[in-house]
Image: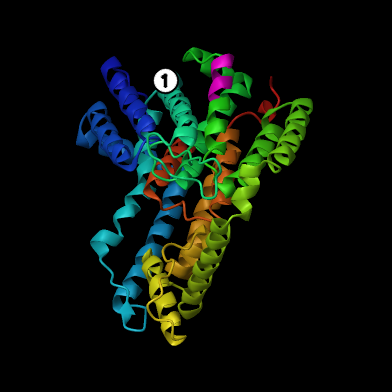
Amino acid sequence: MEQISTQRSRQLLVLGFSVYLVASLVSMAVMSLGAVFLFTLWVVAMGGPRGAWTAVKAEAANPRSKRYLRLTALLAVACIVSLVVAWIVPMGYGSRFVRVSFLKDLQKLWYLFWPLVLAAGLRALPESDRARALRAWLLVFATLSIVGIIQHFTGWPRPQVIPSSDPVRYHATMFLGHHLSVSSIFIFPFFAALDFLGGRGERLRARAVGLSAPVLLAIVALGLSGLFLTHARTLWAALPVGLVLWALWRLPRRWAGALVAALLVLGLAASQLPQIRGRFNSASFSFSFESRLELWRANLRFFEERPLVGAGWHHNAELSGYYQLAKLEEQGKAGQSVFSGHAHNNFLDFLGGTGLLGALAWLAWSVAVLAMAWRSRQAGIVCAWVVFHLNGLTQVNFWEGKVTHQLMIAVALTLVAAPRAPGARNSQ
């Protein structure tokens, strides 16, 4: 697709993308409004509905986007098939059965196709204009990280107490409602800021939008502090993996080695801090671990009963409660409460909800998206995806709406990225 030539249309798109990228860091309601705002300006900038449709068709014809669309269609079909089977023959335990409502159950499919709209809009802008939108994203990311640091000590603006903390401290959740949401969303702008620092081409782009090296260092430091103060245990293990991968990829060997050594020393030192040791020795950790085991067993049971299609997309969440209640009734413990919901593991959630068809389709989708970013030499996005999937070993973050917005932004950035020269790794 050709870039937009009129200044007004470019300004509209830059405004739309800036607002949406900022909204993707705030809250679910703000994200939804930001998406509508961007879509409206995108349609206007493209010359109306006909021009917008032409732009999407052109984007879908791009080889990289075409591959993405095929895998997305495969994943969507697997989800729909699981719902159709659950509607015809609903799964249940005792007297409780799942109830499929296609209008409600299919709502989240739009996320998977949203990157085509985003990519069509980004491709219509010159790289300098894309960088302006990224600047707003990174600056607000740093500002919200400051909010998270304040929140850790004061609880403002939304207190979420860290269990067993003494003195009382709070998870850094910013305005996202939960610390696990932050751990899967803020990793993307964090690694993007690292990328601006870590290569000659990125530094040139950073200066073009007014982000000097000291400013970028401050953004990285604030973002790292905000992520650490989420007190998300899996993130504490996953983020160093992403940092090591990024360092080995983007830095000269001597600097990469120094960073890896520093991370090892900091990790050993941090593991001795009472507040960190307490997070792994507390009663809440034992409860969290045991409850996750129960959910993993439940989803494996759903997979055993329906290996191809599972319990029905998302319906394994409600069925996990029915399954555990039925087990308690069989043991004569009726009336006890159970911990139910999604599987707290991305792969097991797909396996229990959509069976082998859905789980394999999701794996193929995930590998393809990661491979596209890898071939494009997008170190930050690759490392963010790695941390995201490691986080996903103990939570279902792929279908969480707040997180999915960020994922589809990453996909769109990958779709429009041009592959870099093989020697770009240590070009500085």
Q: In the image shown, does 236 or 332 lie closer to the viewer? A: 332
**Residue nearest the viewer, comparing 7 with 299:** 299
Q: Is residue 251 above or below residue 277?
A: above
On the rendered image, what quadrant is the C terminus found in? Answer: top right
Position in image of residue 11 (x %, y %): 30, 19
Query: Percent x, y for residue 348?
Result: 51, 64
Q: Could you tell whether 192 is left or right of 254 in the image?
A: left
- Which secondary structure dominates the residues rendered in magenta? helix
| 90 left or right, relative to 71 | left
Q: Residue at x 40, y 34 (%)?
A: 156
Residue of label 1? 132
State which quarter of the image contains the N terminus: top left
Question: In front here: 423 or 327?
Answer: 327
> Which element is circle 1 on?
helix
Q: Which span of residues is magenta-colored?
A: 213-219
Amino acid identity at mark 1: Arg
